[in-house]
Image (tube, helix red, strand yellow):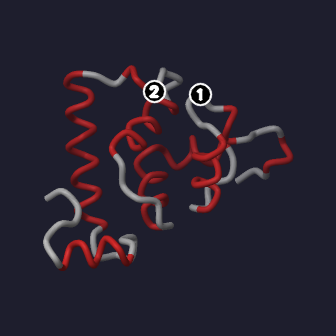
Amino acid sequence: MTDDSDGDPLTAIRNIGPALAADLTRAGISTASALRSVGADEAYRRLLGSGTRPHFIGYYVLHMALQGRPWNDCKGAEKDALRAKFDAMKAGMQGQGNDSALERILDQIGVGARR
């Protein structure tokens, strides 16, 4: 892995702004080359594991970013396939410490995350 001093900031990748870069860094991915190396799925798993709340748009933005495409270029069958992968990943991560205390309470009273 390279360090940030080599001119390889996360924000050099299209669609990766300062907020997402900060989240990725918190998840242990601090350079553009590191993000390219782990890929969108593993990067998103790490984001969830570090406490980022699951959000489908964030997931497909990573995919579009690593392909050099506009974030809103994901449509049709491609978007449907990514949604299925996102839902499976999110389901697989439940109960692994990535839920906030508020989400756990909301789940207990039956008004939590979409089922």
Give the residue drawn at x 28%, y 56%.
89
Residue at mark 2 to residue at mark 1: CA–CA distance: 8 Å
Neighbours of disc 1 within 10 Å: few (<14), some (14-19), many (20+): some
Give the residue drawn at x 17%, y 66%.
111
Instruction: Please tell me whether mark 1 sits on a helix, a strand or a loop.
Output: loop
Q: Is residue 105 left or right of residue 14?
A: left
Q: Is residue 23 left or right of residue 42?
A: right
Type of amino acid at the residue the image marks with label 2: Trp
Q: Nearer the viewer, residue 19 or 37?
A: 19
Residue 71's disc is 2
Q: Is residue 102 above or below residue 6?
A: below
Residue 86 is situated, as x and y percent measured from the top left of the image, at: 28, 48
Residues under numbered marks 2 and 1 in contact, where contact means CB atoms less than 8 Å apart = no
Q: Nearer the viewer, residue 33 or 110?
A: 110
Q: Is residue 27 left or right of residue 11?
A: left
Residue highlighted by disc 1: 14
Determine which quarter of the picture holds residue 103.
bottom left
Type of amino acid at the residue the image marks with label 1: Arg
Neighbours of disc 2 within 10 Å: few (<14), some (14-19), many (20+): some
Residue 105 is situated, as x and y percent measured from the top left of the image, at: 27, 78
Residue 101's disc is none
Residue 36 is situated, as x and y percent measured from the top left of the image, at: 57, 41
Q: Upstream in the sequence, badge 2 or badge 1? A: 1
User: How many numbered markers are drawn?
Assistant: 2
Instruction: Please tell me whether mark 2 sits on a helix, a strand or a loop.
Output: helix
Determine which quarter of the picture holds residue 28.
bottom right
Q: Is residue 94 above or below residue 86?
A: below
Give the residue drawn at x 79%, y 48%.
4
Quadrant assignment for the N terminus: bottom right
Quadrant assignment for the C terminus: bottom left
Residue 64 is situated, as x and y percent measured from the top left of the image, at: 45, 29
